[in-house]
Image (cartoon, helix red, strand yellow):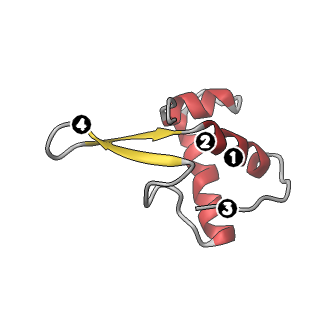
Amino acid sequence: MYPFSLTQVAKALGYASWHHANQLIMRVEQEKGVNIKQSDNKYHVAIMAGQVMQTHKYSQAAIDLLELVKNGEDYEIQV
């Protein structure tokens, strides 16, 4: 399931703004070459909100992954 917005992910990680969580996602892309927002996977899903707009939702696995990134721990991507 994907119950979290990026703002909620950021708050779960102790941040006040979604920007910090997005920076961690960009760090994953730089370090591992994988953008978890680029496709639907175990961390993220894009849901159509109308005919043009998308909303992005995140799983607990995304929070767990970004917590590892935030803490400088080793991590693996499973997409």
Of the numbered discs 4 and 1, the one sitting upstream in the chain is 4
Q: Position of residue 68 (x, y in %)?
A: 78, 48
Residue marked by disc 3: 77
Q: Is residue 72 left or right of residue 33?
A: right
Which kind of residue does numbered mark 3 sit on? Answer: Ile
Which marked residue is nearer to the observer: mark 1 or mark 3? 3
Dot label at residue 66: 1
Dot label at residue 49: 4
For image coordinates 50% across by 36% down, the residue present is 2
Which kind of residue does numbered mark 4 sit on? Answer: Ala
- Disc 4 crowd rating (10 Å Cα; few below 14, some 14-19, many 20+) is few
Q: Spatial distance from mark 1 to mark 3, Cα to Cα?
A: 11 Å
Which kind of residue does numbered mark 2 sit on? Answer: His
- As helix, strand or loop, the secondary structure at mark 2 comes to helix
- As helix, strand or loop, the secondary structure at mark 4 comes to loop
Q: Spatial distance from mark 4 to mark 2, Cα to Cα?
A: 24 Å
Look at the numbered discs 4 and 1 and tell me whether their residues touch, using CB distance below 8 Å.
no
